[in-house]
Amino acid sequence: MYTYLPFFRVALCLRNIDQHLNCPDVCRSKTAQFCTKAAHATGACSSYLDDSIRAVVPDMDSNVTHLSVQLSEFHRQVPIQRRLPLMFFSYNNRTERVIEMQKMASRTAYCPCRMYYRYDSFLDSCVDVSQDIGCGGSNPCANGGRCISTLIPNTQGSEFVQELAAIKCECPPAFRGEFCELELDRCVEENACGEFSCLRDPYDTENGYRCICPPTHKRKSPGEPICVPLPACGEKVEGADQNGLQITSATVSQQPCLNKGQCVQGEDPTMYTCICQPGYMGKKCEIEPPAPTWGPWSMWSECIWPEPYEICYKRPFQQQIRDCITYTPGQRCVGAQRRQRQAGCDLSAVC
């Protein structure tokens, strides 16, 4: 018979209030000595859901009619002393939560077993399976270590040679010990990163460490954490020019060539050549072209006479011209390119 307090706690659990205190927990109802005296147990309490109940857990994606049948079967399968009132399942907007609560209340408490023992639900105790499992049971290797089964001869207590299952742990590079329970710092053990800073990295399952590379360097590869220089021209290959040079496109921080110069990577990552825009010079195309200038004036030309029909309103003239000296496309000189004079070309005829 349910009392007010359990109903009150169930209501709080239903509303997700202090679930660790109010939701059903079969281990919480046990005494402190429940698992401490159990043979070959770890001393902690855990729980499992019986297969007969697990097999009939309702499918919330079913239609209403089918779900109702599933709920009834599920409710019947739960032991009477652990059942929630059937009316709880009639709240459609809470049905899924009630099912989860019923599963919590239906779990069976048990004591997990130490290594080389397996819990037997029929015997409700730990049974010795050390000769059977080797690495086939729970993995005794900590921190991601790989368990390797080996066979060793055993002549104790028998006149016949027997083989017993034994294990060996193959540890990740950041751990050591019989069961990989101890940390290993390769940064201390060896000069793994050379001149660069080294940091133990247990998540690097290949090396166990990583190198702290400056902005001018990068990790050599996913499997090699050492720092190598970044290619001076960047890393993204765009193609090759008409001369077969490998042209790369780099970020602004990587690009050594200034003023839109093209960077050609050398065999050494730190070596490069800049192909400068017309007029620009220097290793990095940093020297800008000089300003455009005028060349010298030419000699005065011969008199340039107007056409006969223009002679009454146009005067003959001489002219000088000069060239604009440019150093890059788009440059222009300021001022006139030619000048004229009438001296020395006067007409004696009168119009």
Image: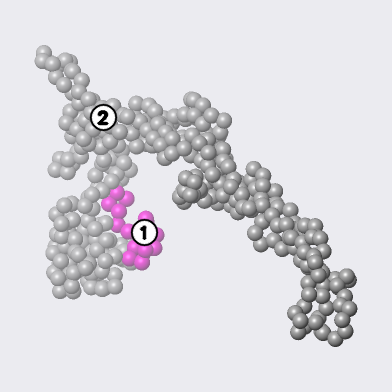
As drawn, the label of residue 19 is 1
The residue positioned 43% from the left and 35% from the top of the image is: 224
Q: In x, y percent, where is residue 336?
A: 78, 68
- Work out which residue is located at the far front of the displayed protein and give it: 349
- Comparing labels 1 and 2, the label whose residue is closer to the camera: 2
Q: Which residue matches tag 2?
A: 148
Residue 347, by quadrant, is bottom right
Quick check: 105 above or below 229?
below
Magenta residues (range):
12-28
The residue positioned 28% from the left and 36% from the top of the image is: 139
Q: In x, y percent, where is residue 128?
A: 19, 31
Instruction: Tell me how many marks there are.
Output: 2
Residue 143, by quadrant, is top left
Q: Are marks 1 and 2 in contact (CB under 8 Å)?
A: no
SS assignment at label 1: helix
Question: What amino acid is labelled 1 in the image?
Answer: Gln
Residue 25 in the magenta stretch? The answer is: yes
Q: Which of the two residues, 104 or 146, is positioned nearer the viewer here?
A: 146
- Work out which residue is located at the far left of the displayed protein and give it: 160
Q: Which of the two residues, 257 or 226, is positioned nearer the viewer here?
A: 257
Quick check: 269 above or below 235?
above
Is residue 199 visible to us here? no
Is residue 238 visible to us here? yes
Question: What amino acid is labelled 2 in the image?
Answer: Ile
